[in-house]
Amino acid sequence: QVQLVESGGGLVEAGGSLRLSCAASGRIFSYYAVGWFRQAPEKEREFVAAIKWNDGNSMYADSVKGRFTISRDNTRNTVYLEMNSLKPEDTAVYYCAVSTLNGLYSTRPFYGFWGQGTQVIVSS
């Protein structure tokens, strides 16, 4: 079983930056990719970004392209989400999850284990 722990959330002013971390432990070898999702108050959980462990290939939601960067450190089993030029609409709880499929997917059914989430609040 894999365990995922998100960290790095907090309160930031519009235009600021935050760096989120997703640390994986346990039996992680059957999983090929890590995705970031977010859920704002009274909104459905939506895709943010994803990255493959082996080659670093990544994809982003249109709403964060050019502002967010996903990366990985395989030696630490950690995936990062660097968020720049933050907007109030980025306010949400951010979750990471792992996928057993050897590809990049933007919908929740393709992901298995999930972390507990970390809160991001962007003030105006």
Image: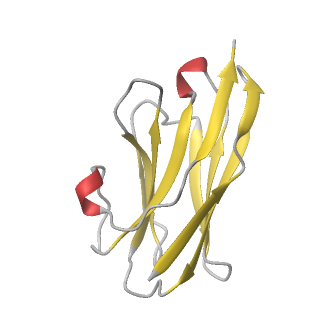
What residue lies at 46% left-to-right and 74% top-to-bottom?
55
Image coords of residue 12 (percent x, y): 76, 28
Image coords of residue 82 (percent x, y): 65, 47
* Residue 16 appears in the picture as rendered: no
Q: Nearer the viewer, residue 104 or 88?
A: 88
Image coords of residue 102 (percent x, y): 29, 74
Image coords of residue 76 (percent x, y): 68, 78
Q: How many marks?
A: 0
Q: Nearer the viewer, residue 66 or 70?
A: 70
Q: Is residue 21 above or below residue 64?
A: below
Q: Is residue 119 left or right of residue 2?
A: right
Q: Is residue 91 above or below residue 9?
A: above
User: Which quarter of the rendering shows the N terminus?
Assistant: bottom left
User: Which quarter of the rendering shows the C terminus?
Assistant: top right
Of all residues shown, which one is farthest toward the top? 124
Of all residues shown, which one is farthest toward the left? 109
Question: Residue 112 occupies which quadrant of the picture?
Answer: bottom left
- Colour logic: secondary structure
* Residue 30 appears in the picture as rendered: yes
What residue lies at 72% left-to-right and 40% top-to-bottom?
18
Q: Is residue 50 above or below residue 67?
A: below
Q: Is residue 110 left or right of residue 124?
A: left
What residue lies at 47% left-to-right and 83% top-to-bottom?
28
